[in-house]
Amino acid sequence: MTSKLVHNPRGNYRFLAAEGRPFSGSAIADSGFDMAHATFERPIPLQTGLEAAARHVAASGRPAESIAGFELRIPRPLSRAAFAEFNGPYVAALGRMGLEIGGLMPAGRTNVSPTIARVEQPCVFGFTFTVPSARAWPAFVLSGSTEEVQGDARAMLVNITDILEGRARELGFRLSDATVIQLYAEVGVDTAVVAEALGAFGEAAMQGIRWFPSMPPIEDLRYEIDARSTGTESSIPV
């Protein structure tokens, strides 16, 4: 799927978009802006969670269009047909929020199915948005990426980091600029293999890797990785 770089002027970030895709591949804040990341103390049902995210952003003095990424949780991995059905109402909801530019969806996304502490319905876990700041290094969010090759765990994880590295390059930053790296995989993944594959993040890996026992949103996929660079991390009571 061919992507293109698009500016979100009201949201103050640029994003990698593709026609027909329900989320962008990544987003980077404009000069003079940072990114803030917030999670709910407990995941909130999808529509309520989207509305709560918009309220939090508004309370921070920012427009809904500043939301650059969502992290979702779903009960179980879906067939490709069911995944397409899931995306329809999601895209419509974001359109109502103003998160659409010329038919393209600017907000990135991670969407996984927890294997421990499962959810009973699609939920919002967290979100990222731009805020004014004089931060001197790149602020960004990389959407969750899954493997596009078959093989052993090492081959699939290296493939994912290669995909993320390519997105970062298109937007002019490096994976080593990340402040948070997140891995989604089942219990039992070989930590030595993970450490080797995530070497692409360089110095950023010194901050550790957040591992969520989860599966990608589509059946037959095994791994997902996302990353971000944010100046603020917060938790929202629910």
Image (cartoon, grey):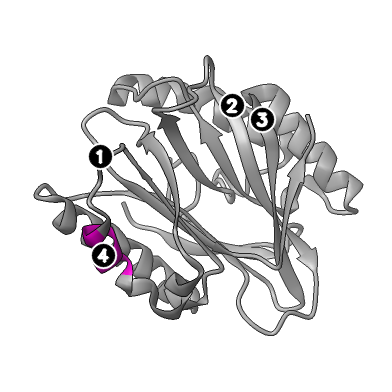
Figure check: 213 above or below 226: above
Q: Rounded to the nearest whole Å, what is the CA distance between mark 1 and mark 2?
A: 21 Å
Amino acid at pointer 3: Arg
According to the picture, the residue beneath numbered tag 1 turns out to be 222
Contact? badges 2 and 4 (CB < 8 Å): no
Magenta stretch: dominant secondary structure? helix
Q: Which mark is residue 123?
A: 2
Please state the horizontal and vertical placement of residue 132, each as a whole percent of the image.
82, 69
Point out the residue furthest to the left here. Answer: 151
Looking at the image, is mark 2 or mark 3 earlier in the sequence?
3
Residue at horizontal 60 percent and vertical 77 percent from the top: 138
Looking at the image, is mark 2 or mark 4 earlier in the sequence?
2
Query: Where, by quadrant of the figure, is residue 192 drawn?
Result: bottom left
Amino acid at pointer 4: Ala
Contact? badges 1 and 2 (CB < 8 Å): no
Looking at the image, is mark 1 or mark 4 earlier in the sequence?
4
According to the picture, the residue beneath numbered tag 4 turns out to be 197
Find the magenta span and give its range: 192-198
Q: Residues within 10 Å of mark 1 (few under 14, many from 20)?
A: some
* Element class at badge 2: strand
Q: Residues within 10 Å of mark 2 (few under 14, many from 20)?
A: many
Residue at horizontal 71 percent and vertical 78 percent from the top: 31
Q: Rounded to the nearest whole Å, what is the CA distance between mark 2 and mark 3?
A: 9 Å
